[in-house]
Amino acid sequence: MGIFIKLNVLMDKIEEKEWEAVYQESLQLINAYSFADRIVDKESSSRDWVYLDRSRERVLKPWHDEVGWYTIGNLETMETAEDFKLIRNKKCYKHNVNCESDCEEIFFSIINYWNLDEEIQNQNPASYRIFDSKTQGLAYHQYILAIACLLESRLAPYAVVSGDVSKGQMEKAIAWANTILEQPIELTERAHNEKLLARLQKCLTKETSLFEAWINLTVNNDNQELGDFIRNKFSQESIVAYFTKLFKEYDPESVGFGNQVKSYFNLHFSLEMLCDICVLNENGCRLSVEFFIKRVIDSGILTREKAVQQDLRPASQNATSTKPDTVDSLFYKTFMKMKGHRQPTKQYLSVTEFKAICTRKFGEDSQIIKMIEEKLSQARDEEGSIINEFEKIIKANLSENQRGAELQNSWDIEDFTQLINWQVGKTIAPEIVEALNKVKLFVEELIVKDHQHFTEFHNYHRQKRLETLIEANRYFCITKKSWDYIEQRLDDRDFIARVLGVFYVKAEEININRLLKSVLCNMDLFNKFVNTNNE
């Protein structure tokens, strides 16, 4: 599970001067944000010296002898995920096209071709995937997205951004980029219904193919406005054919099937048409009436939408969302859906209307009404159980943390992810202070216990002392700024012994890793809590 940003480009259609221009603009965005670069220095030491520094244009050794930029996260927070890079020399992207094709519509490069119409599958542009990495929704996600949107805009119509991104995220990223760039960039044409349709009409002749491709590519929300556009542009036959094929792809009991029913209702398509597709049509899903009624109730169409409600859609499927998901948020949303949490659809039917439509479609049978009442009662019981269980989880977490909501904002630093930004004068939660004190105690006991080892270490010449520290730094990267600070103090026996002691801690658990990385990337923190010479 991950949160991706992807960027595909038809490189054969891009002139070298166009590539050079957009590359130079990307440097403006790189320089405007605290991107973290992972440097592997093979020259300063007999060992590979790996550290983090501010991303900037450089020769991308050891991976390339070419000039470009590289990033894996945010240098200030030290949160890192997967890498993104851009090479100045356009020719470096020539050798890796995924196919030979005459198709020049880049949008087809991001379609999942599985089970789509053959006419769509035949559209397979020879694109190069410039970006295809996970940000995991960390802070640098929005700023990498800004660079991806820059390339899509400047290289249009031969570039496209995709992945776990929403229209709202792209708008926010573009707004930031436009405060830096001399010439503003624009939002993808996937956000403009008419423009997207016009581009696809140049490639596809069958209406069923056109609708299938268009609805797979739009980044707009499933709502009545989008549904009205569909109903105005496509025939009833094409719409029914699409949804019949879509619903039949899913196990009717799966979360995915439920998501598609919700999306259908959000577009304000009718319950009557869904009855035909899922129950009555010979080439449809052929669900039982009882099971169909349950799935419709589960969709939330009988629940009035509240002013404030929890949105369990992935952020990438919510066009108004300006923040990406994280791995934790995706797990949570999936868990709540699997537990049966019902979220209202954007279309509402009263129970009376629901009963009337069902009896009209399935027959004037008292058993239909009874079945509906039973399923509604069962749904209310399940919803109450879910809410109670969720409240228990929240209370248990509060009890486990041993502090109530009124204490949650009592400390400037409340969790390990914030510790790296500690400054003198800021308060730290007691449990984190306790952890810092344990690190200090461990290091001091280690220095006494392994006195001979540390004595031998101090007797090494300066270069070997530095190389010993580099070798000991196995569990995390620290910044070049911290390494410079450490290197300047190689002759300070007590200081350097404590640095080595911190490196020797087995930092495999995530919070221990964050704690120790913060200690060595924030020397004010190190000197306050670990280095007794500075007390």
Image (cartoon, rainbow, N blue to C red):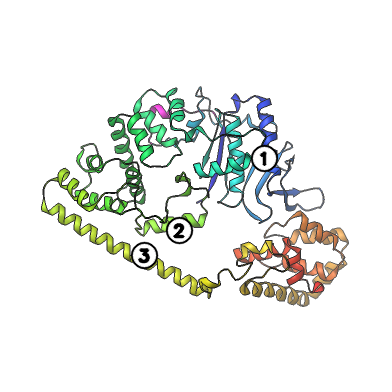
> Which is in the foreground here, disc 1 or disc 2?
1
Disc ID at residue 180 = 1
SS at mark 2 in the image:
helix
Q: Along the polypeptide, which appears first: circle 1 or circle 2? A: 1
Disc ID at residue 387 = 3
What residue type is disc 1 on?
Ile
**In this rendering, would 113 be left or right of 34?**
left
> Which is in the foreground here, disc 3 or disc 1?
1
Taking depth in this image into account, of 357 and 56 the one nearest to the observer is: 357
In the displayed image of the protein, which residue is found farthest to the front?
A: 307
Query: In which quadrant of the rendered image does the C terminus lie?
Result: bottom right
What residue type is disc 2 on?
Tyr
> Which is in the foreground here, disc 2 or disc 3?
3
The answer to the question of whether label 2 and label 3 lie on touching residues, with beta carbons closer than 8 A, is: no
Q: Along the polypeptide, which appears first: circle 2 or circle 3? A: 2
SS at mark 3 in the image:
helix
Marks 2 and 3, Cα distance to the nearest angstrom? 14 Å
User: x, y (%) of residue 102?
Assistant: 51, 22
Instruction: Please say if 393 is above or below 266.
Output: below
User: For mark 2, does the 10 Å Cα neighbourhood hold few (<14), some (14 to 19), or many (20 or more) residues?
Assistant: few
The residue at 82%/50% (across/down) is: 44
Taking depth in this image into account, of 465 and 199 the one nearest to the observer is: 199
What residue type is disc 3 on?
Ile
The residue at 62%/70% (across/down) is: 411
The residue range painted magenta reads 115-126
319 in the magenta segment: no
Marks 1 and 2, Cα distance to the nearest angstrom? 36 Å
Which residue is under mark 2? 332
Marks 3 and 1, Cα distance to the nearest angstrom? 46 Å
User: For mark 3, does the 10 Å Cα neighbourhood hold few (<14), some (14 to 19), or many (20 or more) residues?
Assistant: few
User: For mark 1, does the 10 Å Cα neighbourhood hold few (<14), some (14 to 19), or many (20 or more) residues?
Assistant: few
